[in-house]
Image (spheres, rainbow, N blue to C red):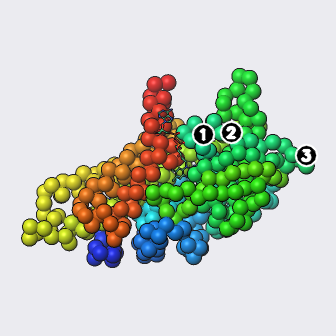
Amino acid sequence: MTDTWKRRGLGEVTTAAPVDALALTPERRALQETARAFAMEEVLPVADELDPRREDIPAPLLDRLGDLGFFGLLVDAEHGGQGLGVFEYCLVSEELARAWMSVGSIIARGNGTGCASPDPARRAELLRASAAGRWIGAIAFSEPHAGSDLAGVECTARRSEDGGWVVEGTKRWVGHALSADFLHLLARTRPPGEGESRSDGLELFGVTKERGTFPDGVTGTPIDKIGYFGLTTWELTLEGLHLPADALQDTGQAEGQGFKDSLRWLGTARVQTAARAVGLARGALEDAVAYSRRREQFGHPIADQQALRHKLADMAAAVDAARALWWHAAWLLDEGAPGGDVAASSAKLFASETAERVTSDALQIFGGNGYTTEHSVERYWRDARLTTIFEGTSEIQRKIISDALLT
Ligand SMILES: Cc1cc2nc3c(=O)[nH]c(=O)nc-3n(C[C@H](O)[C@H](O)[C@H](O)COP(=O)(O)OP(=O)(O)OC[C@H]3O[C@@H](n4cnc5c(N)ncnc54)[C@H](O)[C@@H]3O)c2cc1C
């Protein structure tokens, strides 16, 4: 499958889907085509306009994501979702990130996140809302003093007299917090007991809120970032935040083991980050190919220069290798096969570092024009830089991979 699309300042840009009949069944190919057409026709123009103005993903675009079923890829059909796996979820994510990484990210705030109510009827209701894009959350795990070391979370949730909870603390890096329907919050309900690990006593909570406001007990300050626009990122101060008893998520884990559920979520999140990184790298590569054909110097298109052709070849090979890693990791996670989490770390490490390099090389191919906001390549470059940091830094992925090798 090869498609061409009109791009600002570049004329026609070609996107070439990987051909792998084993992994890409006709159903997956159809899903990929739907996501690609949506990304190129409806997301890219919005990203090109709003990202330079640092604006959020507009509500109509969120509605379109809901209509297309992208918030319900991982939700079972019984609850209105598509009942698909990590592979399909990441296939769509790569396409969305090719247009705007933030849109690739926002679907992770649906797809069943924050639906683990202890009440089965409420859980079913939330799953339906999640699949439809009416229950979009914000992930409030990290804190000023707890990033790579999430077990160091200091935010506390203590029982209130009415059987609910009172939460105190500070959360940092909470993307989409103001616009969300809920906060997916990691907090400490008790100190770890003797002989327990540091992560014991951490639990997940669902904080229901209205879009566009913070609940009583929560104040937010936006963080001034250098990229990843489309999703405003917040620092939240939680003071006397009162939650009902059923805000404590039923993760299926024993008391005090909510952190283990966060880790399970991180496996899928890391493969999805790898897929988003591939989307960014692919976008930069495809745009660089188009630019190098049009731009003439010394009386010839710069694409005639072997130095640039070799650069493009290295970029393409790296993108394909990164994609193969996320495909493999997604397949392992879907199969529940051993090694899925380590493969997720390998995919995340390799794809994010590839994206950083490939987007930088693409910007170089654009020359001075790459260093302007007239082309999307600067956005891919800024957003790719983040992929080596969030969802666990490259150093943390290397620690996970080497620990698996050596223990
Ligand atoms: C734009 C943005 C959006 C984000 N969105 C969210 C979100 O929505 N929700 C959320 O909960 N979090 C979010 N995060 C937080 C993100 O996951 C953390 O920034 C990340 O995990 C790193 O933590 P840190 O920033 O505290 O860095 P630190 O943990 O302080 O690390 C600093 C440096 O030390 C290195 N380091 C730390 N420990 C080790 C070690 N054991 N071995 C080797 N090196 C080590 C790191 O690799 C890094 O280079 C976001 C972050 C950013 C920047």
Q: Which of marks 1 and 2 precedes in the sequence?
A: 1
Tell me where residue 85 sits by quadrant: bottom right
Percent across and percent down for residue 190 are 77, 35
Q: Which residue is mark 3?
A: 161
Percent across and percent down for residue 116 are 72, 52
Q: Which residue is mark 2?
A: 154
Name the residue nearer the viewer: 363 or 257.
363
* Three-letter amino acid code at the position of disc 2: Glu
Q: Are marks 2 and 1 in contact (CB under 8 Å)?
A: yes
CA gap between label 2 and label 1 equals: 8 Å
Name the residue nearer the viewer: 27 or 92.
92
Mark 3, Cα crowd under 10 Å, few <14 / some 14-19 / many 20+, is few
* Residue 292 can be seen in this image: yes
Q: Which of marks 2 and 3 precedes in the sequence?
A: 2
Percent across and percent down for residue 174 are 60, 54
Q: Which residue is mark 1?
A: 145
As drawn, 261 above or below 362: above
* Three-letter amino acid code at the position of disc 3: Glu
